[in-house]
Image (spheres, coloured by chain):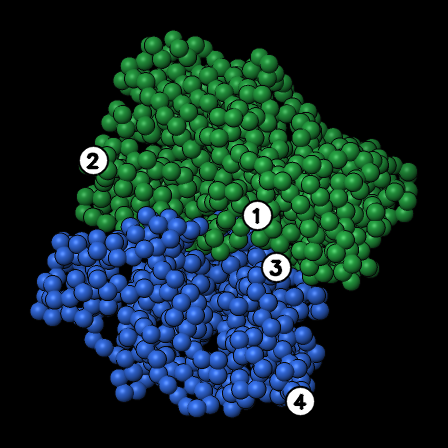
Amino acid sequence: MAVKDIKKLSLETLAQEQQRPTADEAIRLHVKGESRFICDEPKPERLHYATVVVSPYAHARIKQIDAETAKQIDGVVGVFTWRDIPGENELGIKIKDEPLLPENIVSYIGQPVAVIVAATPAIAERACQAVSVDYEVLEPILTIERARAKNSLLAPEFGLSAGDTEKGFAESDYVLEGVITSCAQEHLYFETQRVRAIPGEGAEMLLQSSTQSPSEVQTLAARVLGVDRKDITVDVKRLGGAFGGKESAAGLWSCLAALVCYHLKLPIELKLSREQDMAWTGKRHPFESSFKVGFDKAGRIHAYAVEFDADGGACADLTMAIMQRAVLHAENAYHIPNIKVLARPLKTNIAPNTAFRGFGAPQGVFVIESVIQRIARKLGKDPLEIRKLNAYQEQDGAPYGQQLHEANVLPLLERLEEHTDYQVLKEKVREFNRHQRFIKRGIGIVPVKFGISFTTPFLNQGSALVHLYADGSVSVSHGGIEMGQSVNTKVARIVAAEMGVPLQRVKIESHNTKRTANTSPTAASTGADINGNAARNAAREIIDRLRPLAVQLLERKYGHAAKRILFENGYAFSADAPQERLTLRELAVQAWQSRIDLSAHGYYSTPRLNFDWETGRGTPFSYYVYGCGLVVAEVDLLTGYVTLKEAHLIHETAQTVDERVDRGQIEGAFIQGVGWCIFEEVVYDSQGKNLTESLTTYKIPAIGDIPEKWSIEMIQAEREFAGVKGSKAVGEPPFLYGEAAFFAVKDAIESIWDYTIEADLRMPATPESVLRAIDSVSNKRA
Amino acid sequence: MKISFYLNRDLVHADVDPHLTTLVYLRESRGLTGVKESCNEGDCGACVIALGERTEQGMCYHAVNSCLYPVVRLHGKHVVTLEGIHDADELHPLQAAMENEHGAQCGFCTSGIILSLFCLFLRNATPANEDILQALDGSLCRCTGYASILRAARSVAAQVRMDEDIENHLTPAYFSGIPERLDSIDELIDENRKLAVAARDYFIPEDLHELFEILENVDNPSKLTLISGDTDIMVGVNLGKFQPQKIVDLHRIREFTCISRDNGLITIGARATLSDVLDNEEVRRSFPALTEAVRQMCSTPIRNVATLVGNVCTASPIADAIPPLLAYGATVVVQSIKGTRQVPLRDWFKSYRKTALGHDEVVVAIEIPIIDCLASFEKTGKRKTLDIATVNSALAVQVMKGHFETVRLFFGGVAAVPFEAEMTSEFLTGKEAGEAVIYEASRIAAKEISPLSDVRGSLEFRRQLAANHIIKHFTKLMPSLFE
């Protein structure tokens, strides 16, 4: 068989592989009800339950904690406060402003002040009620406005600029100014925050934590207990959803469990109820952004100045990094020659806001996209025209100097236009609106350019540990966390392809800090890129060690020289004689008996990255993901209800590792984005208490809310600048298409007055918000 | 209490704490951890199980939120979890389709979703898109955006359409033996029955006689909590907001009826679940606004358990079924040891969640007179399904020679009790039907109510909704007026 035919053969096997019903182990377990999450594991002997006493005040001084009554309750084994912390009482990573348990000041409602351990959850809950804490109530800061007025900052403000905005404004035909707000969002992972802490011998402790950042949990637990990281093992099999909410936020709960486990030497379970989780944990950062934009008659933007004020909540947490990403996405997909961006991380007395899919990018992008809409209204032009006019071109550079390779914003927008037959669609919508009095339709479009990599450069590293067993099966541990995004499926596919073994013979193990150390959080859409590449390196190393042995064995078996050795479908063979082959099993046994190491550690660090916030210049991203989305929404002017009639998403996946996984990510992220923009409203009362602390009052999109007509086109082109095996990260970017739904609603409302007036529609576009926007336009007219 | 039931393939005899939920029982006592807890109040669907009951039409399987289902009610029933929907090592077609379409991402909602679909497909092997959406209206998913789940469900329906043989695979083979086996289960054994009423805290009366005896002999009747579907009380219990001292569980009362029609009345008995009401053709024909309200109430798994009578007794000022029942002129039928009395529904609500029901009484039915009128229901919340309304309303109106006659208009969510908009109704009565009159009525309605601001909406929003609902009702009932 010629080399050409061999290539054909491998393509065929690949095609078969893809056609076969999924070999995704986790999904098989899920549909059979056999997949296990932390609280599904059999209970260890003498498992005890921890619960926390939390602050009922947004800001107060603790005068006294009296737990004597609670301690007397039968079944209570201990009550712990900051006094019981043997190590450092600090959870902050970069900025040290977050105690595990506060000594003096509580700074948000729901902040734990004491931990109770009891034989049953019910007793622990009862004991909580019996703890009396004496507070001196202090004045809280509960709004962005108030925080700004008081100059209440978590960290110094920062920003970046390019060109000369003043000159740009001076040269513009029009200058607009305004304020754009975006709202909070509850993560609503289905599995609430939880952890089991299991004591071992000596100082050993195992933490089964629902975290995206096992190494951070390990670091923090060691820090608060005053022990070495070697003493703490964090093991994570899978999470029931996370979306950023378990990146830094899981540390608190894990450390509380670790603290009581340390003292009691008992297995401890700490699990938040749905209400506790919603009431006590941080959300997506709400932003209030003031902008000034200068543009010419055609709609070309000459200058853009924007100040982001984010409500960071009570502690720095990840606020700085989130605002960095907002700053680096301030211009979204548009080339703006003169730009100035400022970020103000504000400190308030609500639960520390934290990572959430998109990580600041959705907030930053929402401002420029709103600005584009305003420019279009001002000029009486179609917003799409303004978007196309300002879209990045291939040769452009981002404001921070990174060259945008393979920037295809414009081609994708044109493709979307063609795919949806945009001009006809637009006319149909206008025709509909002319004939409908109480229902209006609108169109929204958002292009996306999303930078891939942690903006903290050192986090861009992955690791893996691969064992080839002597029976030819493979065990892979890697630095990623499986939370529904199927990073395990992707890593398994990558390793299977690299080692030429069937997917079923590859097992992805739990993430364990003993098998992969110093790992980065599974976040920033990088999980598959960095850990998939690391696993690939490890797999390749093992295969390389096997090659010489394979040559020997093939020669011995078939009696002639073996050349280039290929590994496919569980066999090793010489490229020129594919029928003469060894099973990987034979080879592995032989290798083992020949004392060849069948295990390898793999490592990967993303190349080319450098960024300096001092100068605001550098290469923060490994590559960009491009795409665009169009939504047609229908608004009932009497009830304010929104119906998504159509959604069309064009998304660049490049050479996807798993098409179904990527499709699922695009669909899920989009609907989550729609939730943020249309449905989900976090409401606090005047004292800083979250009133939307249950699913009864907080509404995420349900199955009836998805678009009636929905198309997704995945652009699978070959890209020079991409992630693992030529694929592109997919977790976060499609979230931003949800913003198109918001602009579609706004467009529908503005149709009432023939697009001459801008509606003051506030996010989220709930029925109340929609009716208020209609009302505000009516009033303007009156 | 000692209960017996089938759990998938196995007969289970268990001595259970009646206060336990089915969810906790299945996870903690049976180790069935595929059933998940996520919200514990019937708002997410992660805990949904399939529950089979013998009916006159044969076995009937309903999706039920196990977090709101008292474990004692499993007696004599067939509980089905993911372990029980397939034969041997084969996946059920729904499981296979969910796997193939990647209908599971994190996997936490998957069990509830598959079991909800399983119940749908047992009833209707080729469901239309709307049927699928309705069957899953109680199941949230935060990962998938639902598209893959829909594809999975549609693909099974398509397979059945292509090859009817596949329909046989929808029901596991062992199901055929279940009815007979359920028949052989003995009566529920409540050993506490021997104890004095005062010494007991959970009662499951078998008939009205026994119920009245309990009501009569209990020392402090205000400590009794009567439960029907228990989907409201249980939420408070699960969240630690309400701890009933003594529960009287009415689900086995022999005399309770379902839905019947005679003498120009439709009677909805205390046994009738919201699903019974929704599926009833007579109700749909005579009271479309009630059907519409029930369609928009809670979710399929809750409607399968909650009763209409329970909704009337809970007396929430925002209960969806109440405004249409009021608009249709319903009457509450109340029974005690002394006999039966009828209370017009408009006299039923005394104050916030307080009704005219006496401590010695129980509601046995709701009667609705069949009258010729136009009627409409409207509900606005934050989401169109599985949400509590910010404002709901129902309008019943007769139109004679172009004039409005006997106008009955009721709002929920604008006062401590369901609210009758008397001024608006009075204004409309006798007026010639026309757009200007309707707009004027909507302004009167907005003024007539004095709502509060809360997490579901501001006072201003509620006023505006009240006004807009009036217009909305008439755009549906008399669209030609707006042309």
| Figure chain in green | A
Amino acid of disc 2: Arg
Q: Are the residues under marks 1 and 2 on the same chain?
A: yes
Q: Colour of chain B?
A: blue
Amino acid of disc 1: Ala
Amino acid of disc 3: Glu
Residue A470: x and y in percent read 84, 46
Tag in front: 3 or 4: 4
**Where residue A279 is drawn, which disc sits there?**
1
What is the quadrant of residue B409 in the picture?
Answer: bottom left
**Where residue B194 is drawn, which disc sits there?**
4
Measured in 3D between alpha carbons, the distance from the residue under mark 3 to the one under mark 2, in whole angstroms, is: 51 Å
Chain of the residue on which disc 2 is drawn: A
Horizontal side of A523 relative to B428 (left or right) equals right
Earlier along the polypeptide chain: callout 3 or callout 4?
3
Relative depth, front residue between A108 and A747: A108
Residue B330: x and y in percent read 31, 76
Measured in 3D between alpha carbons, the distance from the residue under mark 4 to the one under mark 1, in whole angstroms, is: 45 Å
Name the residue carrying label 3. Answer: B37
Chain of the residue on which disc 4 is drawn: B
Q: Is residue A239 visible?
A: no
Q: Quadrant of the C terminus of chain A?
A: top left
Q: Residues within 10 Å of mark 3 (few under 14, many from 20)?
A: many
Chain of the residue on which disc 1 is drawn: A
